[in-house]
Image (cartoon, rainbow, N blue to C red):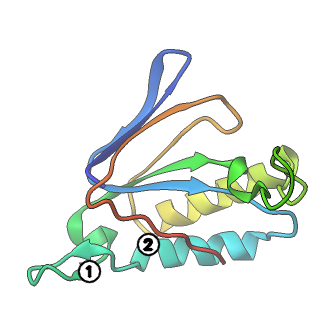
Amino acid sequence: MTSASVTVDGARVAAIGPGLLVLLGVRKGDTAAMAGALAARTAVLRIFRDDAGKMGRALADVGGAVLVVSQMTLYGDTSRGRRPSFDEVAPGPESRPLYEAYVAALRQAGLPVETGVFGAMMDVALVNDGPVTFLLEA
């Protein structure tokens, strides 16, 4: 990804250049240990082009940053009917600490991290390189 930003109520609250835009969903039953493990995987995932044009570099190798945005709709179930069910989504009081644990673990790994505003209606802008998109689960 070459750039990403978050705007809330017309004001830009976060922006990064090259790196990762992480849309983070939390499901009922997720734990702080899972958030830490997911952050550890995110930090070392080799998905950036190396000199041979292969995915051989991690965030730190390319000097990338991370923009983390809470995204509860990721666990919306659309398998039945015409309206998604959010029964599996962890409620805010349960998901916010895990979101914060994930962000803290990325920072502890030495990565520059920006965030959206948890629970807010956000306009998220992304310039995706490739495009390349991955789904990671702990």
- Identify the residue shown where x is 26% and y is 61%: 130
Tell which residue pokes out farthest to the right in this image: 87
| Disc 1 target residue | 55
Label 1 neighbourhood size at 10 Å, few (<14), some (14-19), many (20+)?
A: few
Answer few, some or many: residues within 10 Å of disc 2's Cα (few below 14, many 20 plus, some between 14 and 19): many
Locate residue 118: give its quadrant: top right
Distance between the alpha carbons at the discs numbered 1 and 2: 14 Å
Q: Label 2: which residue?
A: 43
Of the 4 image quadrants, the one containing the C terminus is bottom right
Disc 1 is placed on an element classified as: strand
Percent across and percent down for residue 57 are: 25, 78
Q: Is residue 114 left or right of residue 130?
A: right
Cβ atoms under marks 1 and 2 closer than 8 Å? no
Q: In terms of depth relative to the viewer, which is nearer, 128 or 43?
A: 128
Q: Secondary structure at mark 2?
A: helix
Give, as a three-letter code, the residue at label 1.
Answer: Met
Name the residue rendered at 86%, 51% in the picture: 81
Q: Decide: is 35 above or below 88.
A: below
Which residue sits at x=80%, y=69%?
30
Task: Identify which residue is drawn at 77% across, 54% down.
Answer: 76
Foreground residue among 14 and 1: 1
Q: Left of 112 or right of it: where is 78?
A: right
Question: Which dot, 1 or 2, sits closer to the camera?
Answer: 1
Which x, y percent locates residue 34?
Answer: 71, 75
Task: Identify the amino acid type marked 2.
Answer: Ala
Give left or right: position of 120 versus 21.
Answer: right
